[in-house]
Image: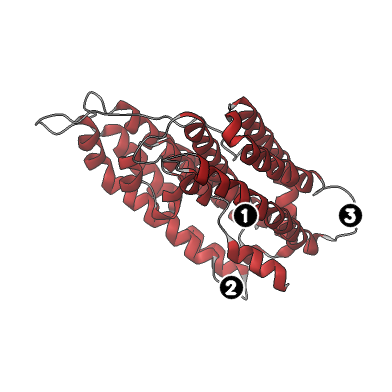
Amino acid sequence: MRRIALVAALALAGTACSPPPTPPQDAIVDELRPLARQADAELRALQTNVDQQYEDMNDLFLRIVDARLPNILAVLGDRARRVEVPEGGEDIHEVMVRFLDRALSFAEDLDAAVAIDALQGAAVAIIGLEASAADFALRLPPGPCRTLAGERWHHVCAPATPMEGYEAGLDVVLRAFIASYEPLTHPARVFGDATRGAVDMALQPEVLDLIDATLARLEALDPGTRYRPLHLQVVTYFESIRIVWEEVAAPSGFTDPLLHDALLSRLDIAYCSALSAIAAEQERVVSAVQGTRIDEILAAWFDDADRCARVSTS
């Protein structure tokens, strides 16, 4: 099975403003914008199709085949390679070509799964397509990210104004985690609960690797005295969800149709248990550190009170 999770270091590319002619970053973005928008439109159309319910899954599979996604992505990749790249625009061009190549590979996996009615394979391939789009956003500089990446992934774009010190490191770690983790934990409901549970079990080793890499990155940061209590709460959260994921494939009394919902429930509990403690330490940092941007950083992941409201009423 093709690996999906991407624990990639964020490439923070900075380009100084240049006088006319157009700066290289702007020039390459202008060239790539139509290709990026078409790729995003195709992926959004796929998500629209899998977000619906079907009495006969063949109806969904016919839509997937008729969309000819591998053909379209192959053409876009070829067009991207033919773009004349100005000096200074190489990094953005490379990220674009990488995205289209990865998306093409998963689109081919999707067509192959559909051809043999393999629900799990189709579900994993769709996750891979979304992971490719998220990784694309993560790797782009701030301005090009908001122009080229799909809007649904703008929350993993690098901040327009660079951060410093511990906050810069924490920001990179959290955005890299989100870009990899969000796609992995949302197998499409249309494939049914049994398939979603099977996908969870298939991706469990990859998720554990991702959480371990995130914990290692957090350990490498130096929070200092003022950030340390908050840092420890963030680490505790990741340790708690690792325990939940570690037990996904263990004998638990759950049949496959119940596994996915049970996993989500336990992850919600771990999240909401951590949220209040993190919020308390976050307030202390805001009070103690002038000009802190910790609210902005943590809002990317630790700001879903609605999720906890659903847990408390379930």
Q: In the drawing, does residue 210 fall left or right of residue 288? A: right
CA–CA distance in space, label 1 to label 2? 14 Å
Q: In the drawing, does residue 237 fall left or right of residue 162? A: right
| Residue depicted at 73% across the width and 39% down the height | 205
Check the picture and name the quadrant holding the N terminus. Answer: top right
**How far across and down, in percent of the image, does residue 286 sit?**
50, 46
Q: Are marks 1 and 2 in contact (CB under 8 Å)?
A: no
Mark 1 lies on residue: 123
**How far across and down, in percent of the image, does residue 146 sit?**
34, 47
Mark 3 lies on residue: 252
Q: Nearer the viewer, residue 49 or 90?
A: 90
Instruction: Point out the tag, 3 or 1, that comes first from the N-terminus.
Output: 1
Name the kind of residue labelled 3 in the image.
Answer: Ser
CA–CA distance in space, label 2 to label 3? 30 Å
Which residue reaches farthest front?
Answer: 288
Check the picture and name the quadrant holding the C terminus. Answer: bottom right
| Residue depicted at 63% across the width and 34% down the height | 228
Instruction: Point out the tag, 1 or 2, that comes first from the N-terminus.
Output: 2
Q: Nearer the viewer, residue 156 or 277?
A: 277
| Residue depicted at 62% across the width and 41% down the height | 230
Q: Is residue 56 above or below residue 149?
A: below
Q: Is residue 142 visible?
A: yes
Name the kind of residue labelled 2 in the image.
Answer: Gln
Mark 2 lies on residue: 53
**How far across and down, in percent of the image, does residue 243 sit?**
79, 44
